[in-house]
Image (cartoon, rainbow, N blue to C red):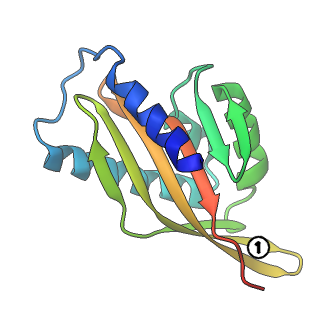
């Protein structure tokens, strides 16, 4: 089950060593920071700024990105996929809904929320209702994605 894999990944982060960077002092501060991060992530994707998007990911071979049954491992492979998917500005748009943020201890959090992705195609725009899960870790004072997962709601055509 996909949900259990994300939960296992999130729980694994709880046992990782805690970095020495200053951490927010409250769940409210973590929520505020993470929601700002999610907005920045969507903005960078909407501007087709692959470099900015990829700076939001942990530059690690352990990075995992999963979407609709496909798994991509490692920062280099995620970057290659982002280069192909994001395309040119205006062809790809992400609209985020209300995200839930679950702090997982010092410098770790999960953000989950609805996303509407619109992709312009030769046959017209295609709109996908999705859920995005980001597992984040704060390293050297900034939040980074260590795992992401996107699931798409089946279309009722």
Residue at position x 88%, y 81% from top? 123
Mark 1 surroundings: few (<14), some (14-19) or many (≥20) residues within 10 A: few
Place of residue 17 in the rendered image (x, y in percent of width and height, measured from the top left): 32, 13
Query: Taking the image as drawn, is residue 142 in sight?
Result: yes
Q: Nearer the viewer, residue 12 or 45?
A: 12
Quadrant in which residue 153 is drawn? bottom right
Answer left or right for 10 relative to 123.
left
Query: Residue drawn 73% across and 31% down?
Result: 77
The residue lying at 49 percent from left, 38 percent from top is 56
Q: Measured from the top left, where is residue 13 in percent x and y? A: 39, 26
Image-based side of 136 in relation to 50, left or right = left
- The relative height of residue 43 versus residue 118 in the rendered view (above or below) is above
Residue nearest the observer in this picture, 32 or 40:
32
Q: Residue furthest left?
A: 25
Vertical order, 115 against 48 (above or below): below
- Residue highlighted by disc 1: 120
Q: Nearer the viewer, residue 136 or 33?
A: 136
What residue is at 72 percent from the left and 83 percent from the top?
156
């Amino acid at each position: 089950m996909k949900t259990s894999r994300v939960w296992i990944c999130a729980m694994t982060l709880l046992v990782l060593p805690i970095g020495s960077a200053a951490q927010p002092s409250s769940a409210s501060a973590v929520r505020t920071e993470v929601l700002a991060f999610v907005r920045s992530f969507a903005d960078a994707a909407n501007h087709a700024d692959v470099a900015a998007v990829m700076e939001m990911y942990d530059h690690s071979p352990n990075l995992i990105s999963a979407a609709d049954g496909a798994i991509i491992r490692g920062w280099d492979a995620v970057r290659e996929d982002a280069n192909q998917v994001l395309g040119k500005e205006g062809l790809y748009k992400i609209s985020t809904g209300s995200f839930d943020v679950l702090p997982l201890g010092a410098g770790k959090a999960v953000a989950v929320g609805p996303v509407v992705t619109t992709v312009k195609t030769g046959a017209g725009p295609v709109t996908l209702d999705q859920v995005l899960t980001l597992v984040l870790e704060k390293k050297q004072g900034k939040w980074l994605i260590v795992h992401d997962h996107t699931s798409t709601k089946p279309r009722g055509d």
